[in-house]
Image (cartoon, rainbow, N blue to C red):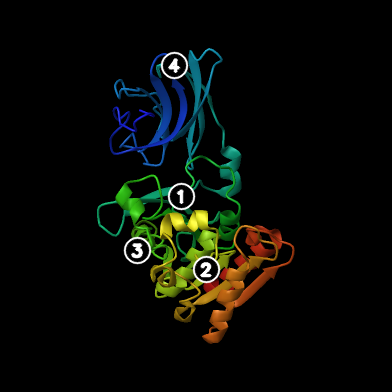
């Protein structure tokens, strides 16, 4: 009730989340929305299209396929096109009635050219997290010419920003920098650890005033579990890379988990959360009054560095102040730490995704982990 603030009734409830609202019809008191985690037999990040009355009754899941879904209505909203896919399932397009009844499969995408080019799709993998109960989901990219008789170093692509989950769920023909690194002879993984969004509140709350955690206990356990399935993985040669919050995470891996991660490329990182935009950082860290800002700062903890580090920053980054990278570099110098520093003239945020810098990143991992 807008006049009193009184909660009239819950519209949805359960061990799942409303991801986005598609439409509210006030004449029929009905809301259409996308939900994640609503099909317990599927990946909890898959988006499904649903309908419910505003009084909370008649909840209906309108999509079925094991994948993440998007829809397109007919002009009269009598039918909708449902498109779904996974990283290991090319898109399937179906025609359904407004009540979700399947009328026909319109198209199943042919991804044979992708398989010819890449050799395999990314693999989905799930393992238990730090609590021994919670499922942690991720994906694995193998080299095109994967040889079961060989061992392979591992590189993790990380972005642990708490505002979302980050492992792709829909099909892609190309994974850009991840494929670039696998082509150099690595297995590349991407994982959503605790502290990221769209699971439970407890899962998300791990990040609060604790961004340095970044789900690392879950990530490390996930990779150890993966080795049981893929014994060719060499866990004595693990690298990590990321940009922005992922750059902060990548360097943090060497500060707090240098016994596991051996090399990191940190691009345009927010290396001290007091130096970045308030609206993003204070959501997770609170106002900068407590010691927790120092405890989570790469800058304040630069002396802890183990392993090989490459710092990358764009000269004209307007998202994260380049000074956070130059100042953490100064702290590393003061602590007598060896590292590489790459300034990309004229580049903005995400400088490491420029062709020149991305080649330098791959060469760094080859030098530090593959040889």
Q: Which of marks 2 and 3 is nearer the N terminus?
A: 3
Write the residue at 45% across / 63% down. 149
Spatial CA distance of label 4 from label 2 is 49 Å
Q: Mark 2 points at which residue?
A: 271
Q: Nearer the viewer, mark 4 or mark 2?
A: 2
Spatial CA distance of label 1 from label 4 is 32 Å
Q: Name the residue under label 1.
A: 163
Q: Badge 4: few (under 14), some or many (20 or more) residues near its Cα, within 10 Å? A: some
Expressed as whole percent of the image width and height from the top left, the position of residue 186 reads 52, 62
Label 1 element class: loop
Q: Is residue 237 visible?
A: no
Spatial CA distance of label 2 from label 1 is 18 Å
Q: Badge 3: few (under 14), some or many (20 or more) residues near its Cα, within 10 Å? A: some
Label 2 element class: loop
Instruction: Find out whether the residues at labels 2 and 1 contact each other: C-beta distance under 8 Å.
Output: no
Residue 324 against residue 69 in the figure, above or below? below
Q: Mark 4 points at which residue?
A: 98
Q: In this view, does 93 lie to the left or right of 49?
A: right
Spatial CA distance of label 3 from label 1 is 19 Å
Write the residue at 54% across / 74% down. 309
Q: Mark 3 points at which residue?
A: 217
Q: Which of marks 4 and 3 is nearer the N terminus?
A: 4
Q: Which of 273 and 66 is in front in this view?
A: 273
Q: In this view, does 320 lie to the left or right of 162?
A: right
Q: Earlier in the sequence, mark 2 or mark 1?
A: 1
Write the residue at 29% across / 28% down. 9
Expressed as whole percent of the image width and height from the top left, the position of residue 363 reads 62, 69
Q: Which of marks 4 and 2 is nearer the N terminus?
A: 4
Q: Which of marks 3 and 1 is nearer the N terminus?
A: 1
Instruction: Find out whether the residues at labels 2 and 3 contact each other: C-beta distance under 8 Å.
Output: no
Residue 146 is tagged as none
Expressed as whole percent of the image width and height from the top left, the position of residue 234 reads 43, 67
């Amino acid at each position: 009730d807008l006049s009193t603030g009184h909660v009239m009734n819950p519209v949805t409830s359960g061990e799942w989340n409303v991801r986005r609202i598609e439409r509210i019809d006030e004449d029929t008191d009905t809301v259409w929305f996308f939900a994640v985690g609503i099909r317990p037999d599927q990946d909890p990040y898959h988006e499904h299209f649903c309908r419910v009355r505003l009084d909370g009754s008649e909840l209906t899941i309108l999509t079925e396929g094991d994948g993440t879904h998007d829809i397109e209505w007919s002009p009269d909203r009598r039918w909708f096109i449902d498109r779904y896919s996974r990283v290991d399932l090319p898109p399937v397009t179906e025609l359904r009635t407004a009540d979700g009844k399947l009328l026909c499969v319109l198209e199943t995408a042919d991804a044979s050219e992708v398989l010819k080019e890449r050799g395999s799709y990314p693999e989905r993998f799930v393992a238990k997290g730090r609590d021994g109960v919670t499922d942690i989901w991720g994906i694995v990219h193998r080299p095109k010419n994967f040889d079961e008789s060989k061992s392979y170093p591992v590189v993790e692509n990380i972005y642990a920003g708490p505002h979302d989950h980050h492992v792709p769920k829909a099909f892609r023909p190309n994974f850009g920098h991840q494929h670039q690194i696998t082509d150099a002879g690595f297995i590349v993984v991407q994982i959503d650890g605790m502290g990221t969004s769209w699971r439970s509140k407890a899962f998300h709350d791990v990040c609060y005033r604790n961004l340095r955690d970044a789900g690392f206990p879950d990530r490390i356990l996930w990779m150890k579990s993966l080795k049981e399935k893929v014994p060719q993985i060499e866990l004595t040669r693990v690298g990590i890379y990321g940009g922005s919050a992922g750059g902060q995470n990548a360097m943090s891996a060497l500060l707090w988990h240098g016994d596991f991660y051996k090399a990191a490329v940190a691009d345009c990182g927010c290396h001290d959360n007091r130096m970045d935009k308030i609206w993003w950082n204070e959501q997770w860290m609170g106002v900068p009054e407590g010691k927790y800002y120092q405890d989570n700062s790469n800058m304040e903890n630069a002396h802890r560095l183990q392993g090989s580090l490459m710092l990358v920053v764009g000269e004209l980054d307007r998202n994260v102040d380049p000074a956070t990278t130059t100042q953490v570099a100064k702290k590393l110098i003061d602590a007598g730490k060896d590292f590489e520093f790459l300034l990309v003239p004229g580049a903005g945020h995400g400088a490491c995704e420029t062709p020149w810098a991305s080649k330098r990143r791959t060469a760094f991992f080859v030098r530090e982990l593959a040889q």
